[in-house]
Image: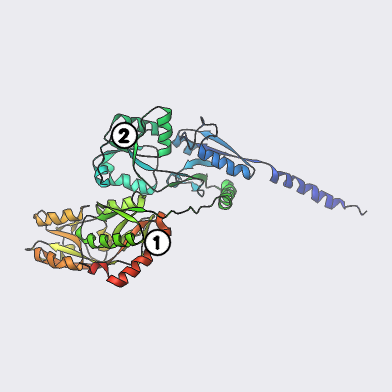
């Protein structure tokens, strides 16, 4: 038998440690917070979300070490080079200097009320007439944050989920934005009344915030590869039997509402319609609190991550300047300093082609602005009108059409699997009836 050359033996010996190291178990250290049932040092599994991450890493020969701290401290400590990152975080809580993993687990987010809260049926009225409790150190997901901002004057912050729950138990007039599984756990543990759910946002991913530094890049790639191969991000969609839809508080919406109700009825889906102010209706759809809105200007949907615009367009609506009978009514009204025009926030996008030096006073209620004009409490308003409304409006006010806008129905993207069927039904119906905007 031929002997191996010494140089070749030396080469094999040099490779041997490499093979051994690659088989050794790694240890990843992360920080977390007390947020049962997702994360807790007092739970045997460390928390359900922690257990999911530990199981995933164990399959890939990685040991997970978890340190529990108050949430802001956990995020600060995780910047240290000894740590991979912090978990579980909503994507909105992935701070500068960190990157988000793919979804590891899922949490819920709901609006709840004190057990004895006397609820009205209209969500906007409920939110407007109640104090809304949030937890101070949480960075809420975008859809919830925008809703909180919309009702900012009613929002109060407390230091923890437990403080929030105790406050709800003491005051029957308040609402709160909560993770319902966390609140349910705390209610049982501390023998407190469980609040009742008013409505629920779209589910929120729980991710690992990983230090975005050169020494951590290999771990980032490793984890996302593990998640890609072991977790199917496609969730089964169940076709709804009922949808909750909003409509803008203006008669213009009515023919579109009737049209979409008939579409959904043909599809075997019941619809419940709630009238809401313009901006807040979109926030409710984006947050997943309601399923969709009957009709919206398609140009105003670009800034909403969770809203799907459904094609084809239902028709066009004229955006008009309405003026008191004794006043001139043309585009100069917009460009003249000193004029005050009642409008809505979203109209700024639709009027971008005009020079606007006038003061646009934003009022959420479109129908409220029309009443102000009728009662001589305003000189000018911007108002959406269908073709059949224009004749009556011209009798009451001076009328100047600013532009035509295409309008579509919208849905929260959680209903994306329904969109092809819905689009087909709309297209077929429009071929029979013509554009909705031409209906009486």
Which tag, 2 or 1, sits closer to the chain's start?
2
Front residue (pair 93, 306): 306
Q: CA distance from mark 2 to mark 1?
A: 37 Å
Front residue (pair 94, 239): 239
Side of 235 relative to 303 (left or right): right
At 47% from the left and 33% from the top, the residue drawn is 34
Residue at the farthest left position: 326
Give the x, y percent position of residue 153.
26, 41
Q: With respect to residue 170, does 110 lie above or below? A: below
Give the x, y percent position of residue 427.
34, 69
Local SS, label 2: loop
Local SS, label 1: helix
Residue at the farthest right position: 1
Question: Which residue position holds label 2?
Answer: 115
Give the x, y percent position of residue 117.
27, 36
Front residue (pair 151, 387): 387
Query: Badge 1: how crowded within 10 Å, few (<14), some, or many (20+)?
Result: some
Side of 240 relative to 403 (left or right): right
Question: Which residue position holds label 1?
Answer: 419
At 23% from the left and 41% from the top, the residue drawn is 129
Query: Badge 2: how crowded within 10 Å, few (<14), some, or many (20+)?
Result: some
Residue 27, quarter of picture: top right
Give the x, y percent position of residue 291.
35, 53
């Amino acid at each position: 038998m031929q002997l191996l050359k010494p140089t070749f033996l030396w080469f094999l010996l040099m490779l041997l440690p490499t093979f051994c190291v690659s088989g050794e178990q790694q240890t990843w250290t992360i920080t977390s917070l007390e947020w049962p049932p997702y994360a807790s040092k007092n739970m045997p599994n460390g928390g359900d979300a922690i257990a999911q991450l530990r199981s995933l890493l164990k399959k890939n020969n990685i040991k997970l070490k978890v340190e529990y701290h108050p949430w802001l401290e956990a995020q600060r400590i995780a910047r240290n080079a000894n740590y991979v990152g912090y978990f579980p975080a909503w994507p909105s809580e992935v701070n500068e200097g960190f990157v988000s993993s793919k979804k590891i687990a899922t949490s819920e987010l709901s609006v709840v009320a004190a057990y004895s809260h006397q609820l009205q049926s209209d969500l906007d009225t409920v939110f407007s007439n109640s104090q809304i409790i949030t937890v101070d150190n949480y960075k809420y997901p975008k859809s919830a944050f925008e809703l909180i901002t919309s009702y900012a004057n009613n929002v109060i912050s407390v230091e923890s989920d437990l403080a929030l729950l105790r406050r709800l138990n003491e005051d029957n007039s308040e609402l709160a934005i909560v993770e319902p599984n966390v609140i349910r756990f705390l209610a049982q543990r501390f023998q407190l009344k469980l609040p009742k759910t008013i409505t629920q946002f779209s589910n929120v991913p729980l991710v690992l915030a990983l230090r975005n530094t050169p020494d951590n890049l290999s771990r980032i790639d490793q984890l996302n590869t593990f998640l890609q191969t072991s977790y199917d991000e496609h969730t089964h969609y169940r076709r709804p039997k009922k949808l909750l839809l909003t409509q803008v508080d203006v008669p213009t919406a009515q023919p579109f509402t009737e049209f979409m109700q008939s579409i959904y009825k043909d599809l075997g889906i019941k619809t419940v319609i709630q009238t809401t102010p313009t901006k807040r209706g979109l926030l409710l759809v984006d947050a997943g609190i309601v399923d969709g809105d009957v009709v919206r200007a398609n140009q105003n949907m670009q800034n909403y991550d969770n809203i799907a615009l459904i094609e084809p367009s239902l028709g066009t609506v004229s955006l008009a300047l309405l003026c008191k009978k004794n006043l001139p009514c043309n585009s100069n009204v917009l460009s003249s300093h000193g004029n005050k025009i009642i409008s809505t926030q979203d109209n700024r996008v639709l009027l971008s082609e005009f020079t606007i030096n006038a003061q646009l006073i934003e009022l959420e209620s479109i129908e409220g602005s029309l009443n102000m004009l009728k009662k001589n409490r305003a000189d000018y308003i911007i108002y959406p009108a269908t073709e059949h409304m224009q004749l009556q409006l011209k009798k009451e006010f001076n009328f100047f059409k600013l532009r035509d806008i295409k309008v579509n129905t919208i849905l929260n993207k959680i209903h994306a699997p329904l969109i092809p069927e819905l689009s087909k039904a709309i297209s077929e119906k429009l071929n029979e009836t013509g554009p909705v905007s031409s209906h009486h």
